[in-house]
Image (tube, helix red, strand yellow):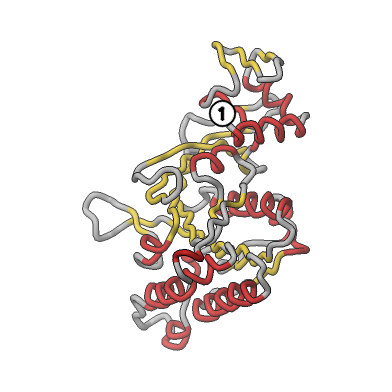
Amino acid sequence: MYMDEYKDYGSFLTGFPSLDHYLMGVPRGFFLEISGRESSYKTTLLQQVFGHIQERNKEVRYLYIDTEGNVTKEYFEACGGDSSITEFIQENVIEEILTYVHKFVVESNKEEIPCLVAVDSIAGFTTLHELKQGISKATQGDVPRILNRFLRTTAVRLKEYGSTVIFNNQLRDDLNSQWGGTVTPGGHGMRHWAKYRVKMYDWSSNSKQYELANGEIAHPVTFLVEKGKNQNVYKGFGFSMDVILGKGFSRELDVIQFGIDNGFIEQKGHYYTLPTGEKFNSKNNLHSFLTETPDLVDMLYKDMLDK
């Protein structure tokens, strides 16, 4: 592919104004990495975004790879995904997975159809060498070498028709750092090849939990962007989104918070005013109103993106 043939395919919209504004959605033609501690809602976010993209892009081919064996179609559909147009694979041998993903991308290009692939997660990878040697033999470096080879050979193929591969990963303690740093399994390959790398931090264990009007419990999850070649190109950029226990990330709460931060929703003390003129005397009342008016949420979401 020559530079004069390069095409900007834009991004897949995620349905959350914060992700679409700060990360410019899911950029097409690239690798992405989402990492976090265990139970930090990585899979939930991935499947919610997957579902929103599927709802608006029926022509795209979809592949979801579960390396940990924890994902079910019922949970996928509860997060908004459409299993009828998604190919599911449960496998953790890295050679088989990445060979299939590369073939899936190339076949999509031959058919001139973009594809969206989710790999959940890098931490679940094992190798044929590791299976053959057994648990008593050391196999350090096998996964990073194979992963890097895949990233190099597939990167340009993604750009041909605007396909995207999203990797979930895990944050783990770095035992080599005296300052208690964190690392992700899979080596340094994703640091170089990912369009952006996002770390998720769940703050459910502290005092930031709050109760909604219907009795549901919500709390913020922080997103820290360590590499971004989109709108924000500097290290250390962060934002947050609220998640509701048992439901996942709330689009309504994100619309409210993003609207307040960017002037779409006026806040004076405990009073909130929508662009349409409706006024509410608490955030809970505003959230309850928006959950009952999905068309208004869609309108606010589109207005936020247009501005």
Q: Residue furthest bottom?
A: 132
Secondary element under disc 1, as helix, strand or loop, is: helix
Q: Write the residue at 43% across / 85% down.
A: 129
Q: Quadrant of residue 286?
A: top right
Q: Is residue 88 above or below residue 269?
A: below
Quadrant placement of the C terminus: top right
In the image, taking residue 248 as reference, residue 190 lies left or right, namely left
Q: Residue at x 73, y 31 (%)?
A: 291
Picture coordinates of residue 221, whole percent (x, y): 50, 40
Q: Residue at x 34, y 54 (%)?
A: 182
Left or right: 82, with 68 as reference point: right
Task: Using a 10 Å C-alpha cutoff, classify the residue at mark 1 as few (fewer than 14 neighbours), some (14 to 19) or many (20 or more).
Answer: some
The residue that disc 1 covers is 257
Is 10 situated above or below 122?
above
Q: Amino acid at mark 1?
A: Gln
Tell me where residue 236 appears, x and y as whole percent: 35, 42
Q: Residue at x 65, y 22 (%)?
A: 284
